[in-house]
Image: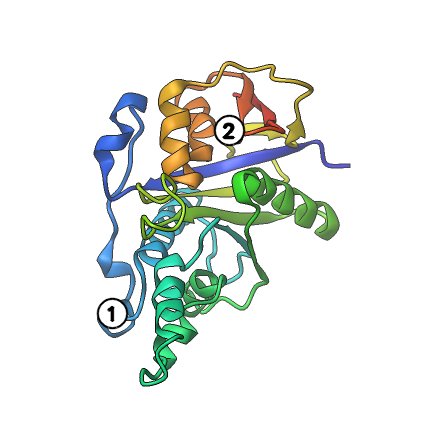
Amino acid sequence: MMKQLFIKSAAVCCPDAEVLVPFKLHSSDIDKSLIPAGMRRRTSMTTRMAITAAKLACSQANSDTQNLASVFASLGGEIQVTDALCRLLPDDNELLSPTQFHNSVHNTTAGYWGILNQCQAPTTAIAAADDTFAMGLIEVWAQLQQQGGGERLLVCYDELWPQYLAPPIGQVAFACAFVLSSEGEQSIGAMTIPQVLSGNQQDLQPEWLKLTESAPAAAAIPLLLALQSKTAGSVPLNIKAPLWATQFVA
């Protein structure tokens, strides 16, 4: 059984970089050049953020994006588009936009990633509430275990939400991406398979708790910080019980 996931690269895209100042975490802004103008006009912030982070991570790992299978994890997905469509439904005089309908599904971002990279490798889109990031890691581990090794791209992201839906969720947009492997060659760190902690065994950083309540994908920040500082130890992966954690190995 594969006991560790090796991390080959990690990248962050956060349009409001100020929110990351307390963590001293490097972030990139959305790279508009990654999506052709005609296609970019149809995409949401969540897709542009996720693709920016994914492209950076793949470039750092020198991964072949045409043949790299992926997992896209997001609590809300295309929440802005879905909300706009739902608000149109009660009006019988309004026709639903085919483009918006096309862009409202949870795997929209994964689809655009495949188109842009001419990638026909398998992709999975998941959502698991507060556990979304942890479940993304477990999904990657399960796929690598089943396939006998290799690499996977994990992208975790959420955009700004309409604030009447579920405040404070969605007050900050955040995306991150990791290239994960079953092999240790050229890795920048390693982690054990996420496990549920027995009881509340960790003191969670208040700044991280507050940010993750507003940006669910920010659950990845402790792992990103462990990678940045090369600090081994237990790393939390979510903020609400049951608490998930992994052991990071520098």
- Name the disc covering residue 30, or none: none
Q: Residue farthest to the right?
A: 1
Residue holding disc 2: 239
Which SS class for mark 1? Answer: loop
Q: Is residue 65 left or right of residue 174?
A: right
Residue depicted at x 65% and y 42%: 141
What kind of residue is marked 2?
A: Ile
- Answer yes or no: is residue 185 visible: no
Mark 2 or 1 closer to N-term? Answer: 1
Spot occupied by residue 74 in the image (x, y as percentages of width and height):
48, 50
Badge 1: residue crowd in 10 Å (few <14, some 14–19, many ≥20): few
Which SS class for mark 2? Answer: loop
Q: Is residue 153 left or right of residue 37?
A: right
What kind of residue is marked 1?
A: Arg
Spot occupied by residue 32 in the image (x, y as percentages of width and height):
23, 58
* Disc 2 versus disc 1: nearer the observer: 2
**Disc 2/disc 1 C-alpha distance (Å):** 35 Å
Spot occupied by residue 122 in the image (x, y as percentages of width and height):
59, 62
Image quadrant holding the N terminus, namely: top right
- Answer yes or no: is residue 44 visible: yes
The quadrant holding residue 26 is top left
Circles 2 and 1 in contact, beta carbons < 8 Å: no
Residue depicted at x 46% and y 58%: 65
Pick the residue in front: 163 or 210: 163
**Relative to residue 167, is residue 244 depicted above or below?**
above
Residue depicted at x 47% and y 61%: 110
Residue holding disc 1: 41
